[in-house]
Amino acid sequence: MQVIIPGQAERYALRLVAHSPNGPRLGTLPHHLGFEVGAPLNDVPSLKLSYPAAGVGAEWLRTPVEIAVEYAVDGGQWTEPDGGRFLRIKRGADSTDLSGTHTYECPAWSWQLRKLIMYAGPVMADGKRPFSAVSAGAILRTLIDEGQARGTLTHLVTEFSTTHDSAGQPWDDDKLLTMALEPGVDLLTLLINLAEQGVIDWTMSGRELCVYNEGTVLGHDLASGGAPVDLRFGRDIDEAPDTATLEDIASAILVRGEQGLMVEVTNPDAYTPWGRWETSQSQGGVSDQGTAVLLGTNALVRAGRERAQLTRGIRFEAARWLPFEHYRPGDHVLAPGDGGQMTSLRLRQITLAVDKDGALSGNVTLNDRFLERELKLARQAAGILAGGVGSGGDGGEPAPEQPGGRVAAKPLGLLINDAAYVDEYGYARGQITASWSPVTKDVNGVAIDPDGYELYARVNQATEPWRLIASSDDTTATYSPLVVATTYAFKVRAVAQGTKGEFSDPVVALIEDDTTPPPVPSTPALSTRLGVIEVGWDGLGQNGGGMPADFELVRVHMAAAEDGPFEVVDHLRAAGTALVADQPYNMPRWFRFSSVDRRGNESAPSSSASIATQPLVGTDLIGQVISGANIVDGTVNAADAVIANTITGNLVQANAIDTGHLRANAVTLDKLAAGSVDAARLTATAIDGKTITGAYIRTAASGRRLEFAPPGSTYPEIRFIPAGSGTNYTRLRTRDDRFTGEATFEVTSGTNSGATAASQTTIAAGYMQMQVRDAALQNDNGGLMELAESYARYGYMHSADDEQYFWFDSSGRTRHVGKWWDYTVLGPTAGIMAGSLTFSPSGTAPNSRIVSYGADIDGNPGPVCVIRRGLSSPATHTPSGSWYVTDSQPTFFRINTSFQDGYAAYWWVHRH
């Protein structure tokens, strides 16, 4: 039992209280022999206790009973925390124990939510109950309302609705659900799964189930602001065991998708003490490269570092902040992380224990921000692979289109879940996962079994064409790449026995932009020489890792005081040094870095460092050793009074120093001022066979010139500069960061007069590329030729809307991406024409129609044509009659049919 000192309230106390099942309070259980309670986030808490047979209230424990854990602070009111109600279900005893002590393992009240299951409903699809684009509250209320109507868990209290969570907040529109649940799924399993996918947070308050939007009520940020909850060593916490493992680390992953898709993704920043470690994963349902890259990247982020579990012991007697009173599972607090630095961590579990003597102990389990991000990435991957969670649209109006009548009814509940990823070249791309309810009936309400589904998309503008982006035999599909920060419209239709069904209502979604900044850079390395401050960066992040593929530059910030204000004075695109001149002597200047990626995301600032420039001449010499223009005889000892590098050539009288007064090797390159030795002072062949290091060589100071290793260049580089400002030039350089262990030769042009385009040629051992890019050489902006060991690609790349190219690879197959020109806009030398026309009913048979090419084809055109009849009742249509291509001329071909009704013609014509 707990020890109470008369006249002194306990700092923090725990007690047990018995309640009748679904009934009133019975009384306290004061004679326990110790208990332990664990309260995790979004899971079932647990209670273990021992109790003597002769203890007060022991008779209550002999039958089913509810046990509440209550706490009090400084003798205040007793409070039952969330998740603090337990069920006495499992008991144990040792018959040889003369004290008659019993042990009890008690799950929380929420454990019995598994006793409420879903039954079959009025609408079923493939034996499952479909839910189409509804909130989590709508699904949960369906289970609970139906179960309680059957008499199950009638004392379970719920305040959330189909439209609002338990805090009265509307359900998140970006987390609607389209899913099919099998009869028999229980309420607890559904709650845990929805929480694992980041849709909800949940807990129990007594017998009330509280469900919230994820990261809101059970995700308070207590780590920031003027008075953060800071758990500090020696005051709030003492023991801090960290367990860590390298078992899951990998720096490369092979993603295996559908249709033979194999994609390797690497993480150059992964921790690799033994070199490259590989892993693989099979991703059923993934058939496009962008989605595979996204999933592989997410997996490598989770496998790129040592995995650590942080446990922090609580000091109840001295703590400023106490569990449940000041923080609870899900909250973000300041606490020592892995290594002891104070950082924002999320509480994942609170564990409290009281021993048989009443001594109180406890600990908290914490996740750092890296692990929280990994959980988010795992949820994103689960959404891509399983579908079902996403946005029902961003509220935009779909661009108008002509409706069409088809056999299968339109799919319901189309949801779009979007994500951004960085491709192998460091550019942000968009990826979507679409999900919808299965189609079970045709347009007339008759049962139908679709063979598959087709997902279409377009940029949400009325003039943009719809494009088939994915086909699926399930109710989910993925696609990439898409242009980030762009609004698209999506629609889906079923296909049954080759007949296209009705399209779903279009859903408009804004593709997520890449908003993740690069890592915080390392601390600047500062030095000063000759009145100039040198600000060095080692190219790494503050934790020693490298920069990601989409890294653009590091900004150099300077301030006159440690607390700012800071201003940007330079930038670095790789490891190197920035030079800052014209700063006053003996005045500290503070420097820090921030990193920026290609989407403009900027990291938090690095740690700052300070330095002050030093005067070139010691002020103690002035007025003491100089009389007028002369130095007082005997006053200057060169070893003591002359600062290094302060006597330059122009201060030495001509011919005053002859060779006899110079020690061998006394004059070295660093003793010579810049520009002090011109060509006239060098003898012929003076530098033949020598190596020039640390030099910036140029053929002229201005105008047309060549520059070798110019200032600011990161790699070996030559610039070819025409007349002008010198900022628009052609460049040759060799890089070592594109392919591991390889030298990559790169040629870049200057920009055009409108500053809209520049060209780049890249040559590596197994890779060559020529492409027109934008003026910053960052984004695709024109023609492309790309050659690699396993493939070749030729075409035009600007955005996902207008990209077009031919793809050849080692499989021996060819693929074309893009659209074909319509026949009406081509001339006489067009090699391929494609098109379609709809002909209205003629009322007579035979029905003869002409398709004109719009030009006199130079050669022999070969038309291939197919007819689609558009009858008003396709379900009753029996294809009868005949049609033929009866005439082929250089300017047209003719179709004859026996139909009197209208029809559409689709054709492909090649010139041979």
Image (cartoon, grey):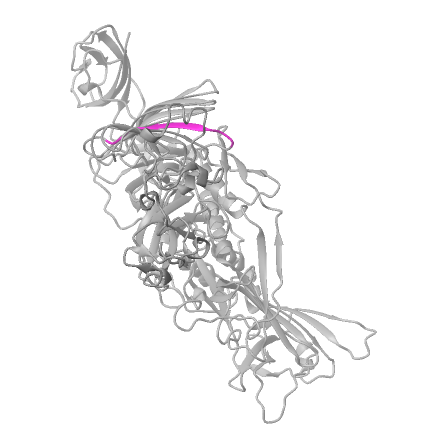
User: What x and y, as percent, mark residue 76?
Assistant: 51, 86
Residue in the image at 46% along x and 33% along y: 736
In the visual, does 110 lie left or right of 681? right
**Name of the residue lying farthest toward the front:** 633
In this view, the residue in front, 158 or 311, is: 311
In this view, the residue in front, 495 or 368, is: 368
Q: Quadrant of the C terminus?
A: top left
Residue in the image at 36% along x and 46% along y: 578
User: What x and y, as percent, mark residue 204?
Assistant: 50, 69
Question: Could you tell me how many numbered marks the image carries?
Answer: 0
**Name of the residue lying farthest toward the right:** 96
State yes or no: residue 832 in magenta: no
Query: In this rendering, does residue 100 appear at all?
Result: yes
Residues rendered magenta in the picture: 741-751
In the visual, does 656 lie left or right of 267? left
User: What x and y, as percent, mark residue 850?
Assistant: 18, 14
Residue 410, quarter of picture: top left
In this view, the residue in front, 384 or 497, is: 384
User: What x and y, as percent, mark residue 267?
Assistant: 50, 41
Residue 113, quarter of picture: bottom right
